[in-house]
């Protein structure tokens, strides 16, 4: 009876284990490297200034081929834990080398010049997405 129960447990957990492995590359790393950037703008920055930053960030995927995915939005959490950060940008890369190439890319540097005068604080986190 114990063998039968263990067999059922094994059969039901095997597909889950195999599915989680399907998100990994041959080097056992997930396929998508996420680069999450949060901005807190200076109080003196106008809505027009912030719109220019949004637009400048938004064109980077068309100028930097290493960016495989791009999403952005503004905070709408009711929790009030954002500490003044209002904008979130999420970029997807397929490798750390691609992310590193993005960081030093001239278009990324040019974006920094648009952002710089309006940036109060930035928070950046990179991680390998597990799902």
Image (cartoon, helix red, strand yellow):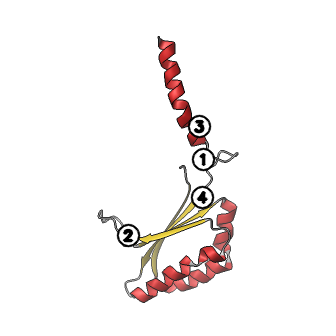
Residue tagged 4: 33
User: Disc 4 and disc 2: Cα gap in Å?
Assistant: 22 Å
From the viewer's perspective, tell me whether residue 128 is left or right of residue 2.
right
Is label 2 in contact with label 1 (beta carbons under 8 Å)?
A: no
Q: Would you say 84 lies left or right of 99 here?
A: left
Q: Within 10 Å of the Cα at label 4, are there few (<14), some (14-19), or many (20+) other Cα atoms?
A: many
**Residue 117 in the image, given as x and y percentages of width and height:** 49, 86
In the image, is residue 75 above or below residue 43? Answer: above
**Is residue 88 something that shows in the picture?**
no
Task: Identify the residue at image location x=38%, y=69%.
Answer: 75
Secondary structure found at label 2: loop
| Spot occupied by residue 105 in the image (x, y as percentages of width and height) | 67, 75
Tell which circle, 1 or 4, labels the residue nearer the N-terminal end. Answer: 1
Numbered tag placed on residue 18 in the rendering = 3
Task: Determine which residue is flagged by label 1.
Answer: 23
The answer to which of 1 and 28 lies nearer the viewer is: 1
Kindly identify the residue that appears in the image at 69 percent across and 62 percent down: 97
Q: Earlier in the sequence, mark 4 or mark 3?
A: 3
- 32 relative to 78, above or below: above
Which callout, 4 or 2, points at the residue further toward the start of the chain? 4
The residue that disc 2 covers is 75
> Disc 1 versus disc 3: distance between alpha carbons?
9 Å
Q: Residues within 10 Å of mark 3 (few under 14, many from 20)?
A: few
């Amino acid at each position: 009876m114990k063998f039968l129960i263990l067999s059922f447990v094994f059969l039901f957990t095997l597909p889950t284990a195999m599915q989680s492995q399907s998100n990994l590359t041959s080097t056992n790393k997930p396929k998508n490297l996420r680069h999450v950037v949060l901005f807190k703008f200076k109080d003196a920055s106008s809505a027009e200034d912030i719109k220019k930053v949004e637009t400048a960030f938004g064109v980077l995927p068309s100028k930097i081929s290493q960016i495989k995915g791009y999403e952005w939005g503004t905070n709408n959490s009711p929790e009030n834990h954002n500490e003044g950060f209002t904008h979130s940008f999420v970029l997807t890369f397929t490798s750390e080398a691609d992310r590193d190439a993005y960081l030093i890319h001239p278009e990324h540097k040019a974006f920094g010049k648009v952002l710089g005068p309006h940036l109060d604080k930035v928070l950046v986190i990179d991680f390998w997405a597990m799902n």
